[in-house]
Image: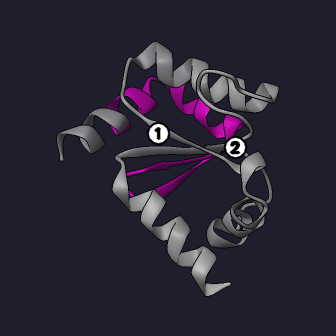
Amino acid sequence: MTDTNDRIDNLVKQSKIVVFMKGSKLMPMCGFSNNVVQILNALGVPYETVDVLEDPEIRQGIKEYSNWPTIPQVYVNGEFLGGSDILIELYQKGELQQLVEVALAS
């Protein structure tokens, strides 16, 4: 389990914005993952995606890593932000734009 944790840790830390999702940013494989991709694309920010469907260890491990039961999961600056619902809410309030701008500037 520690190996998986270390791998997730590295993935989270190597990019400013990382989305653990089903599918990829070019081909999201579920509606919730698609919502997150649409929002980040709308903000026009660079982000990385990790396809949990390709890696069962990551798919299970990320839930334990964040203590969050669902996918997608969004990390900004190494911090767990939330899933699809939280991202939509932050986006609608205009808070997400600020969060990612701060992250990308740091």
Q: Which mark is residue 72?
A: 2
At label 1, the amino acid type is Glu
Q: Crowding at label 2, few (<14), some or many (≥20) Cα neighbours within 10 Å?
A: many
Which coloring applies here? one colour
Q: Residue at x 48, y 69 (%)?
A: 9
Residue 82: x %, y % from top left: 61, 48
In the image: residue 82, left or right of residue 48: right
- Position of residue 49 measured from the top left corner of the image (x, y, whole percent): 55, 40
| 37 inside magenta stretch | no
Residues drawn in magenta: 73-99
Of residue 12 and residue 56, the one placed in the foreground of this image is 56
Q: Which residue is at a point 69% across and 62% down the rendered structure image?
A: 58
The residue drawn where x is 25% and y is 39% is 104
Out of 89 and 50, give the one closest to the viewer.
Answer: 50
- Determine which residue is flagged by label 1: 48
Determine the secondary structure under disc 1: strand
Query: x, y (%) of residue 16?
Result: 34, 46
- Secondary structure at numbered mark 2: loop
- Residue 71 placement, left or right of 18: right
Above or below, 26 against 48 in this view is above
In the image, 67 versus 16, the foreground residue is 16
Kind of residue at disc 2: Pro
Q: Within the magenta stretch, is there residue 86?
A: yes
**Spatial separation of the CA atoms under disc 1 and disc 2:** 13 Å
Q: Is residue 74 above or below residue 26?
A: below
- Considering the image in quadrants, where does the N terminus appear? bottom right
Task: Choose top left, top right, bottom left or bottom right for residue 97.
Answer: top left
The disc, 1 or 2, on the residue closer to the chain's N-terminal end is 1
Exactly how many numbered labels are in the figure?
2
Q: Residues within 10 Å of mark 1 (few under 14, many from 20)?
A: some
